[in-house]
Image: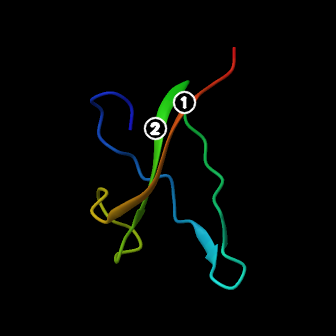
Amino acid sequence: MTGDLPAVRAGALAYDEGDRRGQLEASSPSSAFTVLITLEKDPAPASPSGKGIFSADVVARK
């Protein structure tokens, strides 16, 4: 999410319950944005609807 723009789905986290590790590779044309990871029942929701479990602001280095 960037400012007032709607959320954009970057993909589904490949999560291994046994190792308790996950991985997702994505890119963005924005130099600053917020990453939000949510728990979703639907693997491809139109917008975030599940419980947010992680959020981080990302700013590209200059």
* Whole-number angstrom distance, CA of label 1 to CA of label 2: 13 Å
> Which quadrant would the C terminus be assigned to in this image?
top right
Percent position of residue 32, x then y: 51, 26
Sequence-wise first label, 1 or 2: 1
Q: Residues within 10 Å of mark 2 (few under 14, many from 20)?
A: some
Mark carried by residue 51: none
Left or right: residue 54 versus residue 23 is: left
Q: Is residue 35 above or below residue 22?
A: above
Q: Secondary structure at mark 1?
A: loop
Image quadrant assignment for residue 39: bottom left
In this view, which residue lies farthest toward the bottom?
A: 18
Q: Residue tagged by mark 1?
A: 29
Percent position of residue 1, x then y: 38, 38
Q: 45 or 60, which is in the foreground?
A: 60
Mark carried by residue 34: 2
Percent position of residue 51, x then y: 33, 64
Q: 46 or 1, which is in the foreground?
A: 1
Q: Residue at x 47, y 32 (%)?
A: 33
Dots 1, 2 in contact, CB < 8 A? no
Type of the residue with mark 1: Pro
Image quadrant assignment for residue 44: bottom left
Percent position of residue 12, x then y: 52, 65
